[in-house]
Image (cartoon, coloured by chain):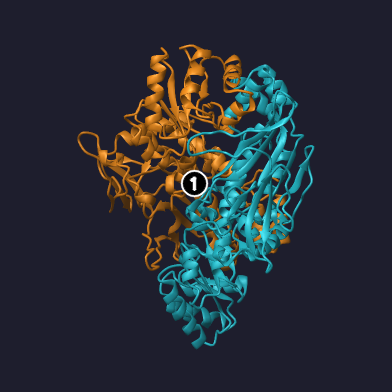
Chain colours: A orange, B cyan
Amino acid sequence: MSMSGALLTDHYELTMLQAALRSGAASRRAVFEVFARQLPGGRRYGVVAGTGRVLDALEHFRFGEDELAFLAGNRVVDDATLDFLAGYRFRGDVHGYREGECYFPGSPIITVEGTFAEAVLLETLILSVLNHDCAIATAASRMVCAAGSRPLIEMGSRRTHEMSAVAAARAAYLCGFAATSNLMAGRVYGVPTAGTAAHAFTLLHDSEEQAFAAQLASLGTGTTLLVDTYDVARAVRTAVELAGPGLGAVRIDSGDLTEAAREVRAQLDGLGAHGTRILVTGDLDEYAIAALAAAPVDGYGVGTSLVTGSGSPTAALVYKLVAREGSAGVLEPVAKRSVGKPSRGGRKEAFRRLDESGTAVAELVTTGGRRPPGARPLQTPLVRGGEVLVREKPEEARARHREAFAELPVTAHQLSRGDAALPTVFD
Amino acid sequence: MSMSGALLTDHYELTMLQAALRSGAASRRAVFEVFARQLPGGRRYGVVAGTGRVLDALEHFRFGEDELAFLAGNRVVDDATLDFLAGYRFRGDVHGYREGECYFPGSPIITVEGTFAEAVLLETLILSVLNHDCAIATAASRMVCAAGSRPLIEMGSRRTHEMSAVAAARAAYLCGFAATSNLMAGRVYGVPTAGTAAHAFTLLHDSEEQAFAAQLASLGTGTTLLVDTYDVARAVRTAVELAGPGLGAVRIDSGDLTEAAREVRAQLDGLGAHGTRILVTGDLDEYAIAALAAAPVDGYGVGTSLVTGSGSPTAALVYKLVAREGSAGVLEPVAKRSVGKPSRGGRKEAFRRLDESGTAVAELVTTGGRRPPGARPLQTPLVRGGEVLVREKPEEARARHREAFAELPVTAHQLSRGDAALPTVFD
């Protein structure tokens, strides 16, 4: 199978292309925008993630022999369309929010401009990447907020599709997670990787003592020992006996974590292991993390809830045609009028208005080129004439998210369902 | 990047391997089982999907130069472990439920047997594939049940990670969906693909009439016209005027779908287009599909809720060591005793007990080789000595699911949250 993502596309995009090639409308200039009508789950803000992955995918979006043979063999489109696809590459422009930036309902996260033909083909791939990555990033950001200064490790790979896992680890890192368990995310994106040990490792050995001794002998006293396979108090005693008070950490994965952490902390301190950290795991989400704020916990491992967007596994972003060249050759705003799903026509620009203290007060979305004085522009050129302009390291997006989040009003820190932390003002 | 999935693995599996190589326990025979402690979302049954993808991945699970260089460069494991990984290939056995089969809490869906070293490395990849695919398949099966004889088209690619989308389309097809919008699923798995048109296509043209005419001219009167961009009644009139009464179908994507379908059906019939079908889309899930049973709808397009598992995006499957060779060289059952998450030791066999009418009445899970007379065995050999034994076409799993579902008691048809449709009896 080739590396092209060109078939990560919906059937109807190609049949629309075929019909538009025939009607002649395929060559009209078109402007598509990616935005969310609302933030799922009553979230107070969304986090942009996936833009870098979109740009990578764009460069490999080609219909090669393999793809064309499939489309021809299954009569998905006619010969004229196959010819068009054989020569296809995106030569248009893309601009949008950078990764790590926050967004709100109606924020034009990505704007794609080109002919209808070249822009319509990107709908599914762009939405797939952004809907997944933004959903995970938004959940991750809430968890980082709830954890305060304590580090979070992403360990949810096993609970989601194997490739989603890699993207989820990346998105979590952009939002402030310290590390991931996913080695591919380390390999591909440079996300720091970390791990402890599983119950299977303890069960494999003839006793917990032998298992701990084996782990310490191989990985050193800085390692993290899993202490809840049998009896936690006995395991902690064994751990410190074997490792000494310099033991790196213990992990608790079951039971009442607040209570267990208090007991283990007291036990560790009693054994002189004041520096041994306590890592807790086990179906944690942002609410459970917040509830552990007063417990003597030094770090959190988060799995299922992170990779499934903590109840909101998709960001509900849409890709809508907002303007296209009319018969007079001029770009005109367009919008559907479907019941309950109206769209807002016209190419948009976006700005964040801050008050004198530097706190964000509104998301401003304008049409017609109006630039509100003093507001921070949110869009940046990403692709020009098909050439990708922006290459960022995850650390850049991570730093940007820290700043963008710090700029939000404190209502953004609320985990409860509610209104967006900023109003979106259309002008 | 190589095609190997070997880094789709958690960091701790490699560090456990390192410690077990050092302690000598790595070479002990081990039995791991994949099962669900409970069915998420109060589901009445689960559907096995992803086994074929696991077997494909197993054959590419190699630590090549690229993978080893990453692990060495990041000091994930020591040199002895790198040497082991360089020569690694799975040479153990796998048996389990076939795709399309139903499962219940405790069903041993997959059993992996080999040395601890070879089996522990597969944990994350096996769980990632099965947790995703089983979650989607289970949601899909409920939707197929709710839709009765009406066809379902999977069109959720844009709402999930781009590669999850392909697996989701496959899982939905296994459970009885008629087609997918995802072209890659057509290319890779032979799932039939289908599509209609988007609002953007109508908006692209100077009028709805021009858009419909263009679509009909290119795709024929058998096509599906999207009728809710502006005014539904006007669009239906225009559609039949242009296509004649032989128009294939219309799609409604907004508004009250029951009411809209009734109005459109009456209008189509009034125009003589008795054979024109009505396809509805727009945030449908199994409950919305069931609620449309009495409406004159001919097919459903399902997106978000399918690819996100309709509220349960992961199947909560775990991979647990249930037996391992002890110091005496004999396989012994093992089980952790963590609070609230106990496991059941011993290598298991599974059977489905049917009553005289052929209706399933219990899931029987035995240890020690007991084979209940008359009950249907549920496990089959999948891999022997590292060689994959089973290659199935999606149609085979699809037929199996039809049979396995038909065998369940009618309580399995209930969409409400509740107990599993079969009790799991451990013996």
Q: Image quadrant of residue A184? A: top right
Chain that bears disc 1: A
Q: B384 above or below B329?
A: below
Crowd tier of the residue under label 1, counting other residues whose Cα lies within 10 Å: few below 14, some 14–19, many 20 or above: many
* Viewer-proximal residue among B33 and A68: B33
Q: Secondary structure at mark 1?
A: helix
Question: At 24% across and 34% down in the image, what residue appears?
Answer: A358
Which residue in the protein does label 1 denote? A132
> Percent x, y for residue A393?
49, 30
Image coordinates for residue A147, horizontal then vertical, percent: 37, 32
Is residue A9 visible to the viewer in this orientation of the structure? no
Which percent across, then down, holds residue A396? 44, 30
Above-or-below relation of A356 to A316: above
- Can you give x and y, in whole percent of width and height, for residue A412 in the image? 30, 41
Q: Is residue B114 visible?
A: yes
Q: Describe residue B381's horizontal placement relative to residue A396 as left or right.
A: right
| Type of the residue with mark 1 | His
Left or right of B337: which side holds B8? right
